Image (cartoon, grey):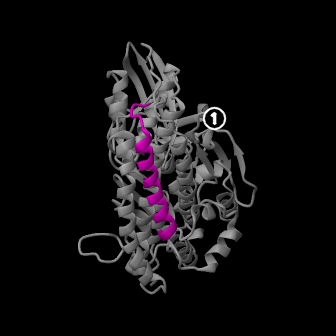
């Protein structure tokens, strides 16, 4: 009798994930045949808000998440600013960008060292030649654990990095300095110098441990061939090269294919009204050239067909969306709705941002190998190398004693939309109020896009489709390939269920 795994497998709850996640797999002949992704928790922030004073949104909404609270704050502030017609002054815009970039880059660092890389230290890989080195660098931290040296260094670097937020916003998470008109926390000349020293501390860690090369050299890698030459020159030097060594051995580029379509709302607005990272929808079907176009937010819908949420009226734009629990709904299996763009599945995250911005290395890697486990991780690391120098420029552009905040006056009635990019991808808030009280608040978070259930047409979400074909080895109850794919999306389930 064959011992090839076949049948139903329930994986979860996942560790090293923010919130509760469960994946139901149908396995046939040692491969995942189909998957259902379940956000098992309901929170209901969208129902906490109606009836409250409009500015309460700036206090309540950041509590959605302890990882991306600044991004939630920025989206809320932009939605109110949209209705009020207010724009932050240059200093305020730079301060907001510095806060959001601080949070996003910290998330990329955490993802690589604390969430993703520890899977390579599992005993299932103990026969691989690189395993002892992986354990030395990336073993999960815990009581009595003496290895995981680079993970420990990354955690210390992350702690020092977040002291930026103390100066920029007073505290993290849930800073209250993010306002529709900019930042309520001015930065003086002495503080600007101290902040620059924090940026240089992080640059030193990245250039010594993660990349073992100057950030500018990493950002200048032009294509997959250049990356391969750089890797081959010293395959164990720095954690990016070592990751590529491990990824090549495990053929991770063949795992977790995305839908071939990515979405970014664009990141880090500039005083000239441009974006430091451009917005875009990129199509990259197999064996076809990549195309880019501007995203049309009017085409966003949320489909609740397979969510434990009311869905009368069918898919709705978030400006008209509802979030009402329906726990006995037939065929439902998640608390997550299914966001769609023009009725189609999209993937979001750092890979979407780098593709939308035309970053040449990520564009070439995706054209060669598609969006998959390696290209998702690589996009985050490239973003670290690109955005930190941007932060140095934004900080240098701040002019002490000039305004950081434009006073605003919210109308009694208003309707607005706030779009931004959290570390995990496209985030949108839609708000409406009357007589100074909130009537409507809807949120579409990055993991809602990536971890969506099926929609009315039966289309699986991005992760559900990416898991199909993943190998399941005899005896595995939590298949390691499934873990790699899930973590390559860097899920945040508390944001998903708001």
> Which residue occupies 34% across, 47% down?
66
Q: Within the magenta stretch, is there residue 196?
A: yes
Give the left or right position of residue 176, taking residue 277 as reference.
left
Name the residue furthest front.
Answer: 190
> Which residue occupies 43% across, 78% down?
134
In the rendered image, residue 101, in percent from the top left (x then y), is placed at 48, 47
Which quadrant of the view contains residue 480? bottom left
Residue under numbered circle 1: 296
Q: Within the magenta stretch, is there residue 75?
A: no
Name the residue furthest left.
Answer: 143
In the rendered image, residue 175, in percent from the top left (x then y), is placed at 35, 39
> Which residue occupies 64% across, 59% down?
362
Give the left or right position of residue 169, taking residue 351 as reference.
left
Looking at the image, is 436 positioned above or below residue 480?
A: above
Point out the stretch of residues depicted in magenta.
183-209
> Which residue occupies 61% across, 49% down?
262
The quarter of the picture where the N terminus appears is bottom left
The quarter of the picture where the C terminus appears is top left
């Amino acid at each position: 009798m064959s011992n090839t795994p076949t049948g139903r497998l329930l994986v979860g709850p996942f560790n090293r994930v923010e919130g509760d996640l469960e994946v139901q797999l149908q396995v046939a002949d040692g491969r995942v045949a189909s998957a259902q992704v379940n956000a098992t928790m309901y929170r209901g922030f969208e129902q906490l808000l109606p009836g409250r004073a409009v500015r309460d949104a700036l206090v309540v909404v950041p509590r959605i998440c302890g990882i991306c609270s600044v991004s939630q704050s920025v989206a809320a502030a932009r939605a109110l600013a949209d209705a009020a017609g207010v724009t932050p002054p240059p200093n305020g815009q730079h301060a907001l960008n510095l806060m959001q970039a601080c949070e996003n880059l910290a998330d990329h660092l955490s993802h690589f060292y604390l969430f993703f890389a520890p899977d390579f230290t599992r005993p299932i890989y103990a026969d691989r030649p690189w395993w002892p080195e992986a354990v030395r660098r990336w073993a999960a931290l815990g009581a009595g654990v003496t290895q995981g040296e680079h993970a420990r260094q990354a955690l210390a670097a992350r702690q020092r990095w977040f002291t930026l937020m103390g100066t920029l916003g007073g505290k993290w998470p849930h800073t209250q300095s993010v306002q529709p008109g900019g930042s309520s926390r001015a930065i003086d000349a002495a503080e600007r110098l101290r902040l620059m020293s924090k940026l240089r501390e992080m640059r030193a860690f990245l250039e010594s441990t993660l990349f073992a090369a100057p950030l500018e050299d990493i950002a200048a890698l032009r294509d997959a061939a250049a990356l391969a030459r750089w890797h081959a020159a010293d395959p164990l030097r720095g954690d990016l090269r070592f990751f590529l060594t491990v990824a090549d051995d495990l053929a991770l580029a063949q795992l977790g294919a995305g839908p071939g379509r990515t979405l970014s709302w664009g990141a880090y607005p500039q005083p000239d009204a441009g974006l430091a990272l451009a917005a875009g929808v990129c199509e990259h079907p197999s064996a076809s050239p990549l195309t880019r176009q501007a995203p049309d937010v009017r085409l966003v819908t949320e489909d609740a067909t397979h969510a434990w949420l009311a869905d009368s009226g069918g898919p709705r734009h978030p400006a008209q969306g509802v979030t009402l629990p329906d726990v006995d709904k037939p065929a439902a299996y998640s608390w997550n709705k299914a966001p769609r763009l023009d009725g189609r599945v999209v993937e979001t995250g750092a890979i979407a941002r780098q593709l939308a911005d035309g970053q040449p290395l990520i564009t070439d890697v995706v054209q060669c190998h598609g969006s998959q486990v390696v290209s998702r991780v690589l996009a985050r690391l490239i973003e670290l190398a690109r955005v930190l120098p941007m932060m140095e420029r934004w900080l240098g552009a701040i002019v002490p004693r000039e305004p950081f905040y434009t006073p605003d006056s919210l109308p009694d009635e208003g309707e607005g939309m706030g779009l931004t990019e959290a570390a995990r991808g496209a985030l949108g808030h839609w708000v409406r109020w009357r007589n100074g009280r909130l009537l409507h608040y809807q949120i579409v978070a990055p993991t809602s896009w990536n971890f969506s259930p099926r929609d009315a047409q039966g289309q699986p979400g991005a992760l559900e489709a990416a898991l199909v074909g993943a190998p399941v080895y005899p005896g595995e109850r939590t298949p390691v390939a499934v873990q790699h794919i899930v973590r390559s999306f860097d899920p945040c389930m508390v944001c998903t269920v708001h």
